[in-house]
Image: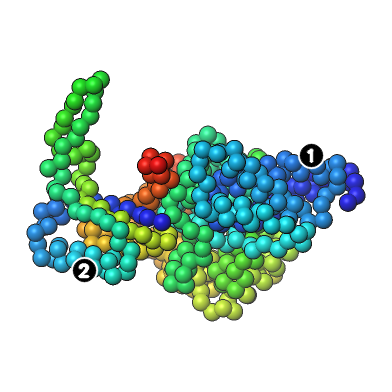
Amino acid sequence: MSGPAPDDTHRRIERVARESYGRLVAYLSAHTLDVASAEDALSDALIKALTIWPRDGVPQNPEAWLLTTARHAIIDHVRHQQVVVASEPTLMLLQEGQEEMALSVKFPDERLKLLFVCAHPAIDPAMHTPLMLQTVLGLDAARIAGAFLVSPKTMGQRLVRAKTKIRDGGIRFEIPQVCQLPERLGAVLEAIYAAFGIGWDDMAGVDQRGCELADEAIWLGRVLLQLLPSEAEVHGLLALMLHCEARRAARRGPDGRYVPLSEQDPKLWSLPLIEDAEGHLAEAFENGRFGRFQLEAAIQSVHAERERSGRIEWEVIVGFYEQLIRVSPTLGTQTGYAAAVAEAVEPERGLAVLDAIDSDAVSRYQPYWAVRAHLLQRLGRTSESADAFDRAIGLAEDPAVRQFLLRKRG
Amino acid sequence: MQFALLIYESPEAFATRKNDSYTGAWQAYYKALVESGIFVGGDPLQVPETGTTMRLNEGKRRVQDGPYADTKEQLGGFTILELPSLDVALDWAARCPAASYGAVEVRPLAPELRRRITE
């Protein structure tokens, strides 16, 4: 053990915390089902590390040190709660805790189970993403609240309620059975993508919040891939997020104005991220079965091709959308399909696709109105187009998008 | 661990209780529960209109004709099952006849509270 500069040690603690947080919380709560206590114990351990490591040096195996210390914190906590009869799983954990923890301790990675618990169908779907961000990545409730546009207090209460349900509701830490795996994995992927989506929509360039959340989502995607390396859809999701991430710098002009994908300067795209995305997409397609995220990533891959070819292969995009509509007929998919058809064939055909969508469903869906306005404008139906622009402008949350639509409307 | 399956039924369902299809579906379900060795207990309840609700208001009895909650679907019975997890309990809830014509709430029992009360 050496005595590095305190700043260095702090950075080391931050890194260990980020990399080990989910692994430690998952392992500590896998038997007790008590995620909240595991998190409390781990934050106690991290606070101890902040005082002890700068003084005595960083231990050889920081993760094992944190695990042992967190375990002691749980034991102390149980001892203080003499009145409460300790549950059987807690007693088991305590027994395990008596064993000597070797420095080279190896403990099973239970994060996949934790991810499935967070996205369990018995948990409010709106809480899947916040739970993952907190229990696997260690984000605090206040930061999560900011991204979800609720007060930190409300988010804190919702997280507590969800964790109580996990502890007392009978949800087990287990990998779902094969027959349920696609659906259950789908919920995990959705939750990760939702985190990315929030980060993405939020990227108005005014603050770092959204940007960080997109990073966290990609990190979660990589964790999931580590745990399920041969699942095509996990590769597909990662490819999709990386393709979008690659365009971050190109999405806004120097003056902050919104730049739509087809008008972005490909020179501003990140080639290493695109290559990373393409690698994952290739891996996904090797497995044969086409899922929603692979198809969405494939569409983004065709757009990325413009960097080399200088043109967008709309016919290919239409083909991918036709497959995507079969597996995931969401409003977003249908709207995207309409836009692609309009480019590949003619605006009337795109408009026909839009007309076929249920009109009640689209009344508050901004992208539908933006695409509709654009197609009507191209067809010279000026007054209808202006009406559709108004709908789109009224529904736009991002001020830059609003400005963009106002300019287009003329 | 033990789970209660709380059966909620609509007035229409309560009205069909004497039908052969109603009892037949429940007989088959009950048989499956018992043969799987998970059945702990349970019973159907009389129709909600037979319920009487009691509250004490400053020591004075307030008796109300009818069930506690004024909702369309009412508690019609309960089953207690011994099962390893919520996922398994949800599988059994999905097989319950009421899942298709009413609703089944799955709720774990609270054995620690029971211990504190009964010790």
Residue B69 lies left or right of residue A377; in this view the side is: left
| Amino acid type shown at disc 2 | Ala
Residue situated in front as seen by the camera: A60 or A19 = A60
Q: Nearer the viewer, residue A396 or A221?
A: A221
Which residue position holds label 1? A51
Q: Chain of mark 2?
A: B
**Res A275 visible:** yes
List the single residue furthest toward the front. B119
Residue A301 in the image: x percent, y percent?
A: 61, 68
Question: Which residue shows up at 23% across the image and 64% down it?
Answer: B30
Residue A52 rendering spot, x and y as whole percentages: 80, 42
Kindly identify which residue carries mark 2. Answer: B28
Q: Are marks 2 and 1 on the same chain?
A: no
Judge by depth and name the residue closer to the eye, A247 or A40: A40
Q: Chain of mark 1?
A: A
The colour scheme used here is rainbow
